[in-house]
Amino acid sequence: MASITKASLPTLDRLQASVPADLDAQKVAAEWFTALGDAPGILTLLLDSA
């Protein structure tokens, strides 16, 4: 199993990308959950596994 400290993850830095300063993270998340359908169910799964 690969170590997280040694795994080659596609981070923003490695992708030479940045997050726009005016990004509305809550709006993006809401749109993703809406697109996936069952937003409350997905949110519950994410919170239960955290």
Image (cartoon, rainbow, N blue to C red):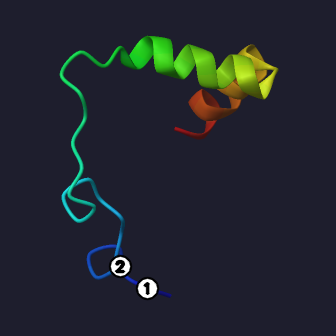
Identify the mark nearer the N-term, 1 or 2.
1
- Which residue does the numbered mark 1 point to in the structure image? 2
In the rendered image, the residue lying farthest to the bottom is 1
| Proximity of marks 1 and 2: CB atoms separated by less than 8 Å | yes
Q: Secondary structure at mark 1?
A: loop
Q: Residue at x 34, y 77 (%)?
A: 8
Q: x, y (%) of residue 50?
A: 51, 38
Q: Residue at x 36, y 69 (%)?
A: 9
Viewer-side residue, 18 vs 45:
18
The answer to whether residue 32 is above or below residue 16 is: above
Closest to the camera, between mark 1 and mark 2, is 2
Q: Is residue 6 left or right of residue 40?
A: left
How far apart are the alpha carbons under marks 1 and 2? 6 Å
The answer to whether residue 1 is above or below residue 43 is: below
Q: x, y (%) of residue 22?
A: 23, 15
Characterize the local packing of mark 1: few (<14), some (14-19) or many (20 or more) Cα atoms within 10 angstroms.
few
Residue 32: numbered disc: none
Name the residue type under label 1: Ala
**Dividing the picture into quarters, in which one does residue 7 lie?**
bottom left
- Which residue does the numbered mark 2 point to in the structure image? 7
Viewer-side residue, 15 vs 34:
15
Q: Residue at x 73, y 15 (%)?
A: 40
The answer to whether residue 35 is above or below residue 46 is: above
Q: x, y (%) of residue 34?
A: 71, 16
Q: x, y (%) of residue 10?
A: 36, 64
Q: Secondary structure at mark 2?
A: loop
Name the residue type under label 2: Ala
